[in-house]
Image (cartoon, rainbow, N blue to C red):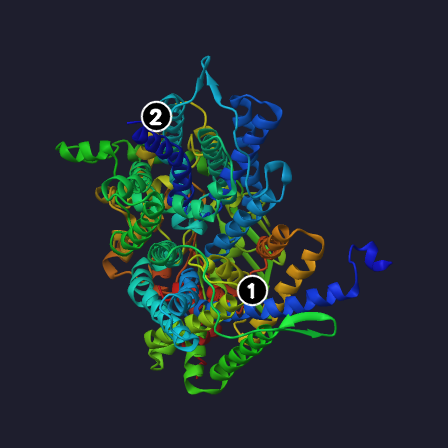
């Protein structure tokens, strides 16, 4: 009765939506983990994350389908290419740009990374065609849990997402190198002063971030397919989750926010067309930004996100 | 031939998008990746009205443009306070949401859009071929170019460039930064709507793909490639991007599919290369055909107005007569940040026509006081009265217009504006400084020449008239401080708050600076300076206020203050 009133056929539909939400959400979260690491530590608005993401999955699919490689080496090659491409973005393009552009660095880096995405995606299409390609590596069959249907692949991707995020969290909080990364994130200048090689940390962060994003791409491609432009939507989600998670780039928190975003999207899709329910998460982002703008207008000067702090530090240094 | 005219038509339509985006991004420094969405609003609305309700081209175009303009105005409201990555995100969200909403409306054709739109009748004949469309597109693109050139070249355009360089400094000179930002956002959104309408009619269809994220990116490429803040550059950038497709098709003989991919690869690479090696773009800011001609002609030096002294004398009388003895009175001002009380119960008064020094140890709250007085921060308690008028809580630009202007410790000159333009920004009451005046057809040149003469007088006053045409950012730090002083003087505000005017510059410049500041009271100005160098304060200030832990704890002449233990303690550590 109540179910009919709010437009739901049965309780199991809700359960299915929740399960799908958690599965998709782990994917969104993992995407954001890589993106947020790069953004918070290096301060670069790395839109070309879309390209490294697509490279990992699309190259793996091409190697598997066109050149007949087994899944494991194909995936490894895809991931390695993504990591190299990510590092190259920083060392070849962003670093020289931001060294020169000073206060306008954020915009210059963003526009340059748009250029990288445009060129890269279309080069991939030119080389192997724009169409989607399947990646088959891991076999999958569907299972039923308490009335909700999911696949073994879904289980694998949730486990991998949680394990990777947890692993990264451990790396950041327990290892010496992780502490160096966190030091650079807090204050790059002070880090230099105490002898941390900031350029090396940036390189490592771009490599790690691209690898994490690459794994997310492989998981996505295993479930659906890989195409050269698959990264655009992915980077949108990475952006939304990263900014909704504010001030934090803790991998586990990002994962949680990712699940939250996907749940909102899934639950919305019960009432809305799939087309409109994609829009819902952007409305969420819009609401968040408007709220932030309002708070600034009312004189609250707490710029909690890391970038704001980083910029004042840089600005104060002249 | 028709093939190339088709390319020209497309370039003209995209020029409308790119010219307007350049005003927003290149001149005003505001990023938008929602240009495609604003085009979609215009294109879809006009297409729908024409197809379903049989509207003629003219009214459909007007409604399409108006709708995009209104949406732009609405979007600009949350955008006003956001900068950098947040503005990118906001416009991205608008781009995506707009297209999601449009494609989910079945009356607008969902994912396929509307096709077979009716043609345009112009002067009794219907536009059919690309040649016919030139009759429409050439005048429209030209009109948009001239409009953008007028805005960019007007005093309002100078303010937009000021906002790009430094919002806070622009606001401190009495400009309503938020109004400019929302107006320029709305104007450019409306023009993107115009581009969308033209695109729809030219193709005879509207579809989501015509206005997607990649279209927004393409327009950004045109602007950056051609040259940010140069409208001629935008024409070049647009032509290059639009013509690159046919180039790959005709010259390299790629198939249609491959050539469009190759085109995208090419301009992606070109974008990165330009940013990396020629960030100013193909045609740099400030380069115009007439500037090129001028450079080829000899002579044409700087003309310094001769009547400078006389003009200043006249203003002294205007400023100084029949007013109360206190120019500024602040009572019981308090401000806390979280748990820290930066300023607490501060009383400060500035006597008319005198120089007051505000001194105190680091962290005493001196700069916070300036921020409270000028409205950059709102006080938690207390009142500020300027010339008998309560100005507590007014926004910075209104306080500046009411007659109190500040300078900044870190100068905040507009680096890419010339020295002269920096000072011109300060001149109050310029005609054509508001956007709406720019959009009317009245001539602005005479007024701007007057502004220019005034600014030159002030530059002459600080001894920098010879450097008027150099970019302010290329001057030495000490010279930039003088430019900032001239800029503040040019506002003709009666009360000047100078934040460390002589610090961080070498002796030669600081002597120069002190000399200028010392002459200000003669001209009827009331001055308050914050300065660390007690020698400078002693030479300048008639009266000194000593600040400690957020309030004024002592005041008097330097001789009186130096006898007080507390001051010595604060500066030199505990006595004895």
Q: Whole-Å distance between the Cαs marked 1 and 2?
A: 53 Å
Residue wearing tag 2: B446
Give residue B322's mark: none
**Does the residue at mark 1 contact the one at mark 2 (Cβ under 8 Å)?**
no
Relative vertical location of residue B446 with respect to residue B259 in this rendering, above or below? above
Task: Tell me if A257 is positioned left or right of B153 in this view.
Answer: right
Nearer to us in this view, B556 or B380: B380
Nearer to us in this view, B420 or A180: A180
Give the label, 1 or 2, closer to the camera: 1
The quadrant of the image that shows the N terminus of chain A is: bottom right
Relative vertical location of residue A178 with respect to residue B179 in this rendering, above or below? below
Label 1 crowd bin: few (<14), some (14–19), many (20+), radius 10 Å = many
Relative vertical location of residue B18 with respect to residue B395 in this rendering, above or below? above
Q: Secondary structure at mark 1?
A: helix
Marks 1, 2 in one chain: no
Where is residue B566 drawn, in percent x and y? 48, 73
- Residue A8, by quadrant, is bottom right
Q: Chain of mark 1?
A: A
Q: Secondary structure at mark 2?
A: helix
Give residue A241's mark: 1
Examine the rendering and report whether any part of residue B215 can be seen: yes
Where is residue B253 drawn, in percent x and y? 25, 43
């Amino acid at each position: 009765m109540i179910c009919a009133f709010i437009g739901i056929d049965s309780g199991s539909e809700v359960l299915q939506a929740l399960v799908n939400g958690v599965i998709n959400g782990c994917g969104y979260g993992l995407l954001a983990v890589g993106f947020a690491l790069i953004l918070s530590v290096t301060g670069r608005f790395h839109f070309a994350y879309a390209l490294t993401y697509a490279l990992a999955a699309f190259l793996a699919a091409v190697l598997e389908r066109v050149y007949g490689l087994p899944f494991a080496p194909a995936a490894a090659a895809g991931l390695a290419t993504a990591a190299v491409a990510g590092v190259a973005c920083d060392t070849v393009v962003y670093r020289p740009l931001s060294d020169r552009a000073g206060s306008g660095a954020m915009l210059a880096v963003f526009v340059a990374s748009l250029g990288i995405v445009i060129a890269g995606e279309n080069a991939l299409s030119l080389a192997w065609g724009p169409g989607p390609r399947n990646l088959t590596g891991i076999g999958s069959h569907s299972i039923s849990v308490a009335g909700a249907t999911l696949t073994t692949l879904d289980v694998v991707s949730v486990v991998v997402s949680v394990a990777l995020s947890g692993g990264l969290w451990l790396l950041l909080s327990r290892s010496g190198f992780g502490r160096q990364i966190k030091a650079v994130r807090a204050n790059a200048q002070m880090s230099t002063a105490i002898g941390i090689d900031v350029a090396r940390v940036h390189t490592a962060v771009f490599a790690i971030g691209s690898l994490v994003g690459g794994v997310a791409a492989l998981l996505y491609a295993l479930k659906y397919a890989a195409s050269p432009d698959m990264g655009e939507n992915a980077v949108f989600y990475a952006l939304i989750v990263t900014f909704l998670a504010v001030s934090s780039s803790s991998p586990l928190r990002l994962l949680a926010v990712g699940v939250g975003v996907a749940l909102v999207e899934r639950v919305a899709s019960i009432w809305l067309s799939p087309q409109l329910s994609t829009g819902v998460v952007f409305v969420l982002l819009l609401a968040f930004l408007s709220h932030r703008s309002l708070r600034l207008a009312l004189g609250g000067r707490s710029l909690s996100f890391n970038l704001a702090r980083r910029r004042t530090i840089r600005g104060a240094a002249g | 031939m028709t093939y190339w005219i088709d390319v020209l038509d497309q370039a003209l339509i995209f020029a409308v998008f790119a010219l307007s985006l350049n005003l927003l991004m290149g001149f005003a420094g505001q990023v938008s990746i929602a240009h495609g969405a604003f085009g979609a609003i215009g294109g879809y609305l006009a297409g729908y009205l024409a197809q379903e309700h049989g509207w003629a081209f003219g009214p459909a175009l007007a409604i399409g443009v108006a709708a995009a303009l209104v949406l732009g105005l609405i979007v600009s409201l949350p955008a006003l306070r956001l900068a950098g990555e947040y503005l990118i995100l906001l416009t991205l969200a608008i781009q995506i949401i707009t297209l999601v909403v449009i494609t989910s409306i079945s009356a607008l054709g969902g994912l396929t859009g509307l096709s077979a739109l009716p043609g345009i009748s112009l002067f009794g004949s219907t536009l059919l071929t690309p040649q016919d469309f030139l009759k429409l597109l050439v005048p429209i693109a030209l009109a948009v170019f001239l409009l953008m050139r007028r805005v960019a070249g007007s005093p309002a355009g100078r303010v937009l460039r000021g906002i790009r360089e430094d919002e806070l400094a622009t606001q401190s000179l009495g400009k309503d930064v938020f109004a400019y930002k929302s107006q320029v956002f709305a104007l450019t959104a409306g023009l993107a709507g115009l581009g969308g309408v033209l695109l729809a009619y030219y193709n005879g269809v509207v579809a989501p793909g015509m206005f997607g994220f990649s279209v927004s990116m393409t327009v950004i490429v045109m602007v950056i490639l051609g040259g940010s803040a140069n409208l001629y550059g935008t024409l070049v950038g647009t032509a290059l991007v639009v013509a690159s497709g046919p180039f790959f098709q005709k010259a390299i003989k790629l198939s249609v599919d491959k050539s469009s991919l190759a085109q995208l690869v090419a301009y992606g690479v070109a974008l990165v290369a330009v940013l990396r090696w020629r960030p100013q773009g193909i045609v740099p800011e400030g380069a115009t055909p007439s500037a090129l001609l001028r450079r080829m002609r000899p002579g044409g030096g700087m003309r310094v107005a001769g009547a400078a002294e006389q003009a200043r004398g006249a203003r002294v009388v205007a400023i100084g007569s029949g007013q109360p003895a206190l120019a500024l009175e602040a009572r019981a001002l308090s401000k806390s940040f979280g748990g820290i009380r930066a300023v607490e119960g501060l009383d400060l008064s500035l006597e008319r026509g005198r120089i007051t020094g505000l001194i105190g140890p680091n962290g005493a709250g001196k700069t916070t006081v300036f921020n409270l007085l000028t409205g950059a921060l709102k006080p938690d308690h207390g009142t500020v009265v300027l010339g008998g008028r309560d100005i507590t809580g007014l926004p910075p630009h209104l306080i500046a217009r009411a007659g109190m202007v500040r300078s900044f410790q870190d100068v905040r000159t507009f680096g890419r504006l010339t020295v002269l333009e920096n000072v011109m920004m300060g001149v109050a009451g310029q005609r054509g400084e508001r956007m709406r005046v720019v959009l009317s057809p009245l001539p602005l040149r005479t007024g701007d020449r007057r502004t220019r003469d005034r600014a030159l007088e002030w530059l002459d006053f600080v001894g920098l008239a010879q450097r008027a045409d150099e970019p302010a950012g290329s001057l030495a730090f000490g010279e930039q401080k003088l430019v900032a002083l001239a800029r503040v003087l040019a506002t003709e505000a009666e009360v000047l708050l100078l934040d460390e005017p002589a610090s961080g510059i070498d002796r030669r410049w600081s002597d120069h600076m002190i000399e200028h500041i010392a002459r200000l009271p003669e001209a009827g100005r009331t001055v308050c300076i914050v300065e660390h160098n007690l020698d400078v304060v002693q030479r300048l200030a008639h009266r000194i206020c000593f600040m400690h832990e957020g309030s004024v704890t002592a005041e008097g002449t330097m001789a009186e203050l130096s006898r007080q233990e507390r001051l010595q303690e604060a500066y030199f550590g505990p006595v004895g």
